[in-house]
Amino acid sequence: MSDCLFCKILDGDIPADIVFESDTAMAFRDINPQAPTHVLIIPRQHISTINDISAADQSLVGSLFTAAREIAAKEGLSDDGYRVVMNCNEAAGQTVFHIHLHLLGGRSFDWPPG
Ligand code: AMP
Ligand code: ZN
């Protein structure tokens, strides 16, 4: 998608602090971090929202979680814990319409979220 910010990061047209790459996914640090570790994990394939995920994407979407597990371990978050979040559409606060997992760690989090 030519007008998608995260596709531009995937294409190298916009710089990012990349922390993970695989055949299916890529992860980079959030530009406006909400925790000491705040990483965004995105599929290489453009999917706008969770509503657009199909059955054929199950393995691709699963790979975002295995990436989260690997990055959390690398960042030293596995034992203390961390939060993984994906927002869907405006009411949930989605602002970039290329699905992404937020991996947040390094502090405690409230529940329920605001
Ligand atoms: P969401 O609100 O769930 O769609 O999350 C979008 C996230 O993308 C926000 O946390 C932003 O801070 C982050 N973001 C926006 N632009 C960039 C960028 N150029 N590089 C890294 N993160 C970004
Ligand atoms: Zn995209």
Image (cartoon, helix red, strand yellow):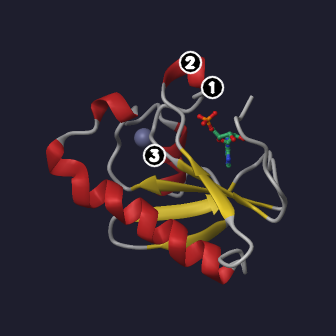
Judge by depth and name the residue closer to the eye, 8 or 35. 35
Which image quadrant shows ligand 2?
top left
Amino acid at circle 3: Cys
Labels 3 & 1 near each other (Cβ < 8 A): no
Q: Can residue 16 be seen in this view?
A: no
**Which image quadrant is residue 25 in?**
bottom left
From the viewer's perspective, is residue 113 above or below residue 20? Answer: above
Judge by depth and name the residue closer to the eye, 109 or 105. 109
From the viewer's perspective, is residue 73 above or below residue 101? Answer: below
Residue 90: which numbered mark, if any?
A: 2
Q: Name the residue under label 1.
A: 93
Q: What element carries label 2?
A: helix
Q: Mark 3 points at which residue?
A: 7
Front disc: 3 or 1: 1
Q: Residue 17 location, x and y as percent?
A: 69, 64
From the viewer's perspective, is residue 30 above or below residue 48? Answer: below
Amino acid at circle 1: Gly
Disc 3 CB within 8 Å of nearest ligand 2 atom: yes
Left or right position of 5 against 77: left
- Distance (Cα) linking label 1 and label 2: 5 Å
Q: How crowded is mark 1: few (under 14 residues within 10 Å), some or many (20 or more)?
A: few
Amino acid at circle 2: Glu
